[in-house]
Image (cartoon, helix red, strand yellow):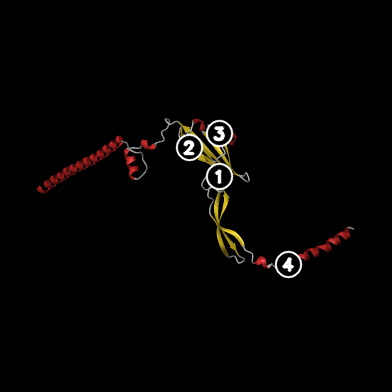
Amino acid sequence: MKTLGKSYILGILPCAFYLPLVVSIQEITIPAHLKSAVVKIPVNSTSCSVTCGLGFKLEELCEITAEGQRRNCSLHRSECLTSWVCGLHHFTVPVGKPFQFSCLTLGTAGLGSQAYIYKWRLAQGLITTNDALFKPFKNSNSVIRFSPTKESDAGTYRCDVQMLKTFRIIKRVYFGVTVIQNDLVDLNFQKFLTWEQKLTAKKQGEPTENFTHEEAQEEQHFCQGELFYECLVGVGSGMIGGVLVSVALCFLRKILRR
């Protein structure tokens, strides 16, 4: 029985090697409708409109013929997702000032804010990205508004943006809010500029505070002082120059007399 089995296997092996040769020799006929088929593929693309979260990009789609030629090209807008984690944004807000921040950006793809679900969480009084420290925060909108801002509003707000149809998370962003007292730090830096810096900013067209009457008088005195200083320097330079010329002439006379 073993001998018969071996002979049977040896008889099948030549047939197995012969079949691919028969198939390769036969001609393969390509249907006519496949020969004229046209494929439309993207040949060029812009970068994503946002660095994190769901954005969009423009793609150039062209029909590619069997000869490799492009035709009937058109621009197509498609969604793109580079990274869904956007990191931490920190803000310092004085007490009593209105303030707001939003999950959405101008480059976000979709049909406006109604295409997404927003889930907020809060780590009150902390600036952190440790997700274990966050608790649910009731807000169904993409924007959080403080009007006015209170000390209890300080903390880190985490926003998860989900697609309305698939519940897929497409963006996670953290907003750190530090609330300070108005008398603790004065954020009006223009008040601490010197007159030279204010005049320079005014000449360059940069926005400055409106000058009061006293400030205008001080500015006038400052300009008059500068003018007096320039006149004094000019007169002094002239006198010194005259003295030097006189000394030089006297020295030349003595040399000539010898």
Q: CA distance from mark 3 to mark 2?
A: 18 Å
**Horizontal side, residue 5 vs residue 143: left or right:** right
Q: In the image, residue 125 lies at what x, y percent?
A: 53, 31
- Contact, mark 4 vs mark 2 (Cβ under 8 Å): no
Q: Nearer the viewer, mark 4 or mark 3?
A: 3
Q: In the image, residue 24 lies at what x, y percent?
A: 73, 67
Q: CA distance from mark 1 to mark 3?
A: 24 Å
Q: Return the residue at label 4.
A: 24
Q: In the image, residue 242 lies at what x, y percent?
A: 16, 44
Q: CA distance from mark 4 to mark 3?
A: 70 Å
Amino acid type of the residue tagged 4 in the rendering = Ser
- Contact, mark 3 vs mark 2 (Cβ under 8 Å): no
Rendered residue at 67%/66% (across/down): 33
Looking at the image, is mark 1 or mark 3 earlier in the sequence?
1
Residue placed most toward the observer, 178 or 151: 151
Q: Return the residue at label 1.
A: 113
Amino acid type of the residue tagged 2 in the rendering = Phe
* Mark drawn on residue 123: 3
**Horizontal side, residue 235 vs residue 25: left or right:** left
Amino acid type of the residue tagged 1 in the rendering = Ser
Q: Return the residue at label 2.
A: 99
How busy is the neighbourhood of tag 2: few (under 14 within 10 Å), some, or many (20 plus)?
some
Looking at the image, is mark 4 or mark 3 earlier in the sequence?
4
Q: CA distance from mark 2 to mark 1?
A: 20 Å
Circle 2 — which element? strand
Rendered residue at 30%/36% (across/down): 213
Looking at the image, is mark 3 or mark 2 earlier in the sequence?
2
Q: Nearer the viewer, mark 3 or mark 2?
A: 2
